[in-house]
Structures are given as structure tokens and as C-alpha cells.
Amino acid sequence: MSSDITTLVKKYIETWNILDADQRRAAIDALFTEDVEYVDNNVQIEGRAALDDYIAQTQKELAGAVFSLAGEVSSHHDLARFTWHVGPADGQPIAIGYDFAAVENGRVRRLYGFFS
């Protein structure tokens, strides 16, 4: 179970780096439940389309930045906790985030993010 959730989290982080709209949406459809709930410091949204729009908006705001997993994924009972960085590919992070995800039937159902 833990390796499945780790794989899911890694694919989730990679989704933030997919600039092609069709490829990104296909990744979102594969990774998230239709009624996904996503909450962070900036938004509270529901649904794959809203999440896709938010990722696209974030990519524009952080043009050239790369998201990466920072450390191990901690998980149990279909829940995951993980840290990520965003910043230049060869530089220091401009933001660090801590996310919590709830998985349902192999897809992310809820994701809660915190920035520092």
C-alpha cells in the first residue's frame, strides 16, 4: 500500500511540471477522483477541471519553476504526508510546501497543502 501511495504522490508532483494542457489533464484524470477537493493557502476548489485550471495558473505565475518531491512520503491507511519544493531547476527553492492527501480507490480524493 505504501509504495502505491508513494508512486501516486510522485506522479502528483510531476503533474505540476506538465506544461502541455492535454497531457496535464490526462494526468489529472488518472490521478484524482472526479470530485477531488483541493485546499491550500490560496484556494479551496472541487473537481478535476478546477484543479487543472489552478495548476495552469500557478505554472504561469511561476514560469520556469520546477516542482520536486523533497524527501520521503509518509503514509498509512490511504493517507499520505509529504514535502515538496518549487524553484529554479538548478537553484534554491522559492517555496516549500507540506501536503496531506487522502486516497480513495487508488486516486487522490482530498489534498490539503501548506506553504512556508
Image: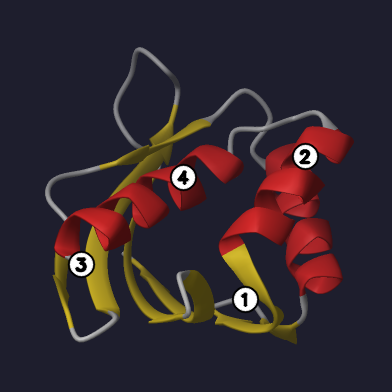
Residue at the location (34% across, 43% down)?
A: 85
Residue 83 rendering spot, x and y as whole percentages: 25, 57
Q: CA distance from mark 2 to mark 1?
A: 15 Å
Residue type marked 3: Met
Secondary element at tag 2: helix
Q: Earlier in the sequence, mark 3 or mark 2?
A: 3
Q: Is residue 14 left or right of residue 96?
A: right
Task: Tell me if mark 3 has few (under 14), some (14-19) or many (20+) residues whose alpha carbon lies within 10 angstroms of its own.
Answer: few
Residue 89 rendering spot, x and y as whole percentages: 42, 18
Residue with the mark numbered 2: 60
Residue with the mark numbered 1: 42
Q: CA distance from mark 2 to mark 4?
A: 20 Å
Which of discs 3 and 2 lies nearer the camera? The answer is: 3
Residue type marked 1: Asn
Which of discs 2 and 4 lies nearer the camera? The answer is: 4
Secondary element at tag 1: loop
Q: Is residue 59 left or right of residue 86?
A: right
Residue at the location (73% across, 67% down)?
A: 51
Secondary element at tag 4: helix
Q: CA distance from mark 1 to mark 3?
A: 31 Å
Task: Tell me if mark 4 has few (under 14), some (14-19) or many (20+) residues whose alpha carbon lies within 10 angstroms of its own.
Answer: some
- In the image, residue 17 sits, relative to residue 105, either above or below, namely above
Residue 88 rendering spot, x and y as whole percentages: 45, 22
Residue with the mark numbered 3: 1
